[in-house]
């Protein structure tokens, strides 16, 4: 039988943060529910209360301004990102990764922030967001704080988010505008499947960045590397930051081989 919980849908940010300040111990945020509801159904998560955040008006929408950068709010779905003209023109790597996440139906519900908070090693949005040097804005009744995405992930399905905090926005900085990037995801089947590995390579603000998912406890990213870096050196830096395992989907050795291959191919593509 499905675990029983109460359902609330606050209409404002203040109402949400008030609720969390007292009930955080047994509450869970619901965005698209494509991870949360699966976890409730299989019994790995047993919240006393589910807080739906999609009724909060200011949590919708993607905006861009030079001062603030690209802002992705909590109700922004993957399909919102795929349809957005600003993302298409200036931050296309987000769309490259979004296209590879699940199926159209899932992408209609799944949010970018839900994907990041879920902190799966095989997150498809993380490689793009990491390459673009994104920041995560956390909010609670105690105030707000901003954390670089690469410091937000701390382990398999673990983040620095405190139990009374929400992710209020993801910010892709203006410096990443116009970044040229490519993403390759290796899957067992054609169509939608979780990644065996995912590699994004981007030229951001005059530097090369390489991000990898499914090859370490968290998605990982290099520092900005020189544009003229030797391919072998870029591969070595990437291989040193990953620690793949063998599992039901493939062996550690195959993951290493494919990361190596994708870095070489993508580097050639983005450098033209
Ligand atoms: C069939 C299927 C296929 C999938 N394929 C892929 C795939 O190919 N690639 C991939 O990366 N993922 C995949 N997923 C996973 C999933 O769709 C994504 O992780 C999705 O983006 C999660 O977003 P959501 O809005 O549904 O999150 P939810 O399920 O609503 O929430 C996920 C977690 O984040 C928390 N949360 C959500 N929003 C906030 C917030 N603003 N502040 C604080 N906490 C919050 C929730 O409490 C929960 O713990 C798949 C899932 C399914 C069911």
Image (cartoon, rainbow, N blue to C red):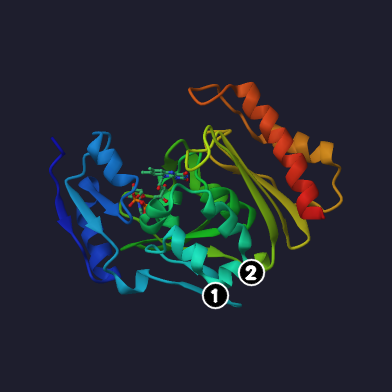
Q: Which mark is residue 190?
A: none
Q: Is 265 on the left or on the right of 230, as rendered?
A: left
Q: Nearer the viewer, mark 2 or mark 1?
A: 2
- Residue at the far front in the pictured view: 190
The residue at 86%/42% (across/down) is: 230
Q: Residues within 10 Å of mark 2 (few under 14, many from 20)?
A: some
- Labels 2 and 1 touching (C-beta < 8 A): yes
Displayed quadrant of residue 55: bottom left
Q: Residues within 10 Å of mark 1 (few under 14, many from 20)?
A: some
Q: Which mark is residue 90?
A: 2
Q: Is 134 on the left or on the right of 38, as rendered?
A: right
**Residue 217 position in % (x across, y down):** 52, 34
Q: Is 178 on the left or on the right of 220, as rendered?
A: right
**Residue 100 position in % (x across, y down):** 53, 49
**Residue 246 position in % (x across, y down):** 55, 21
Which quadrant, please, contains the C terminus? bottom right
Displayed quadrant of residue 134: bottom right
Q: Nearer the viewer, residue 208 or 38?
A: 38
What residue is shown with label 1? 64
**Residue 183 position in % (x across, y down):** 64, 49
> Circle 2 — which element?
helix
The residue at 55%/36% (across/down) is: 187
The residue at 14%/47% (across/down) is: 5
The residue at 21%/52% (across/down) is: 50
Q: Nearer the viewer, residue 84 or 230?
A: 84
Q: From the viewer's perspective, is residue 161 above or below residue 52?
A: above
> Circle 1 — which element?
strand
- Of the two numbered discs 2 and 1 on the same chain, state the one appearing first in sequence: 1
Q: Mark 2 CB in 8 Å range of ligand 1?
A: no
């Amino acid at each position: 039988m499905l675990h029983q919980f109460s359902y609330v849908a606050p209409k404002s940010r203040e109402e949400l943060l008030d609720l969390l300040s007292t009930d955080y111990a047994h509450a869970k945020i619901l965005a698209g529910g494509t991870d949360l509801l699966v976890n409730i159904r299989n019994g790995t998560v047993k919240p006393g209360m589910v807080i739906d955040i999609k009724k909060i008006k200011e949590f919708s929408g993607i905006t861009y301004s030079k001062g603030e950068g690209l802002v992705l709010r909590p109700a922004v779905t993957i399909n919102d990102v795929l349809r957005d003209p600003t993302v298409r023109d200036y931050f296309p790597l987000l769309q490259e990764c979004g296209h590879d996440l699940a199926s159209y139906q899932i992408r209609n519900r799944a949010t970018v922030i839900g994907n990041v908070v879920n902190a799966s090693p095989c997150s498809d949005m993380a490689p793009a967001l990491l390459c673009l040097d994104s920041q995560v804005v956390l909010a609670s009744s105690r105030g707000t704080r901003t954390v670089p995405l690469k410091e937000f992930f701390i382990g398999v399905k673990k983040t620095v988010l405190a139990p009374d905090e929400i992710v209020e926005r993801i910010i892709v900085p203006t410096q990443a505008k116009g970044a040229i990037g490519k993403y390759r995801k290796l899957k067992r089947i054609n169509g939608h499947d979780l990644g065996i590995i995912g590699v994004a390579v981007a030229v951001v603000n005059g530097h090369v960045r390489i991000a990898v998912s499914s090859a370490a406890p968290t998605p990982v990213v290099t520092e900005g590397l020189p544009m003229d870096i030797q391919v072998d050196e870029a591969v070595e830096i990437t291989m040193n930051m990953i620690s793949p395992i063998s599992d039901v989907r493939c062996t550690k050795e195959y993951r290493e081989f494919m990361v190596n291959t994708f870095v070489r191919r993508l580097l050639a593509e983005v450098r033209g």
